[in-house]
Amino acid sequence: MQKKRSFQRPVIVISRCIEHDPVRYNGDMISSPEVAAMKPYVSFIPVCPEVEIGLGIPRSSIRIVRTSAGDRLIQPATDRDLTEMMDDFSQTFIQSLPPVDGFILKNKSPTSGIANVNVYPSGGKSRAIEKGPGFFGKRILQAFSDYPIEDEGRIRNLRIREHFLTRVFMLADFRQVESGGTMSALVKFHSENKLLLMAYSQAGLATLGRIVANAPHYPPHTIIPEYRRALLKATRLPPRYTSHINVLLHSFGYISDHLSSEEKRFFLEQVEAYRSGRLPLPAVRIIIQTWLLIYPVAYLKNQTWFAPYPDGLVSLPAEELQRGREMYEQS
Ligand code: SF4
């Protein structure tokens, strides 16, 4: 029987104005149902760089201004140039962080944004001439390349959120490997994540497999960081649906000997329904999980691909959740 997975708590740095404190320039807080849903499962480290460098709440807004000396972080109402203060804070903050698994930053903020932040030609009334990351966001992207880094706008998208959650829970597990520091913990992590890694990248899985195979020749303190770097690279892009189909068929191959021809045909029809977009992945994956209750296959049990993050965070598109219930409400 497949064992229920237990999850480590990912550590995620978050912009403090998202679901934490009313620290925005106008004294507002941003509401994010997606972030609120994560609170029971995640340890957040909230940070507001603008408050940390001494700007008050409320405060005059700031913007990125392109000058001959490069892009500067300016508060037009006071004419203050905050660039050095923000860079110093960002550096100190990054150096003081404990091990973290990901970031959720405020979108479009000249400080915290990771993309699409307006760059202006002046502090006065003018049109944006370019878009890019904010000052703090840029430092995070540089220091944590390949990490799960999202903003609260993008994370509303189901596919982006699934990819983010899968990675932060995977990295939280990997921190346990790092704190244990043993080869056996690394081998266990690799075996339990094989299907998930296969879905992400066959080439990445092969690279990680080679690192584990060579592990006996090297001390754990060199192999484990090498594995982490390769793991981050292998999972940088979300899996394609065709890769999930490969994993479905690969798993099916371990069970199919036990199945009747009708059961096999039924399963393959559901795979085709997933391929053509008529069924979501969990609806097909659960068929394999159900068979695993009857036919225990050692290789498949404990595979994280079956439950990449807690059930409480699994969500369907809003229209699917609503299911036209209002149409049947009694007046
Ligand atoms: S976007 Fe960043 S700097 Fe602005 S209020 Fe939120 S946390 Fe503070």
Image (tube, helix red, strand yellow):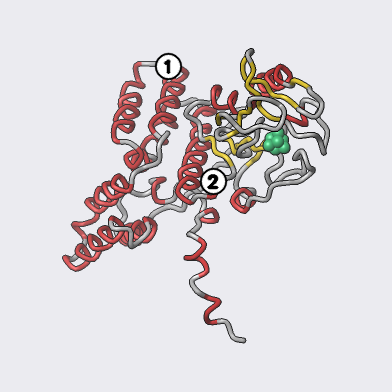
Residue at figure coordinates x 51%, y 27% from the top left: 178
Q: Is residue 30 left or right of residue 182?
A: right
Task: Identify which residue, 160 or 24, lies in the foreground.
Answer: 24
State the quadrant of the C terminus: bottom right
State the quadrant of the N terminus: bottom left
Task: Identify which residue, 127 or 158, lies in the foreground.
Answer: 127
Residue at figure coordinates x 66%, y 19% from the top left: 91
Q: Is residue 241 left or right of residue 22?
A: left
Task: Please provide percent x and percent y for residue 80.
Answer: 78, 22
Q: Is residue 279 visible?
A: yes
Q: Is mark 1 within 8 Å of ligand 1?
A: no
Residue at figure coordinates x 35%, y 28% from the top left: 208
Residue designated by label 2: 155
Task: Give neighbour class at mark 2: few <14, some 14-19, many 20+ (Cα, 10 Å).
Answer: many
Determine whether 74 is above or below 108 in the image: above
Which mark is in front, 1 or 2? 2
Task: Please provide percent x and percent y for residue 21.
Answer: 76, 43
Residue that sits furthest to the bottom in the current view: 331
Q: Is residue 46 visible?
A: no
Residue designated by label 1: 219
Residue type at tag 2: Ile
Could you tell me which secondary element the residue under label 1 belongs to? loop
Residue type at tag 1: Pro
Task: Please provide percent x and percent y for residue 259.
Answer: 21, 62
Q: Is residue 294 left or right of residue 41?
A: left
- The earlier-in-sequence mark between 1 and 2 is 2
Determine whether 155 is above or below 85 in the image: below
Residue at figure coordinates x 35%, y 61% from the top left: 279
Quarter, ligand 1: top right
Task: Identify which residue, 259 or 13, lies in the foreground.
Answer: 13
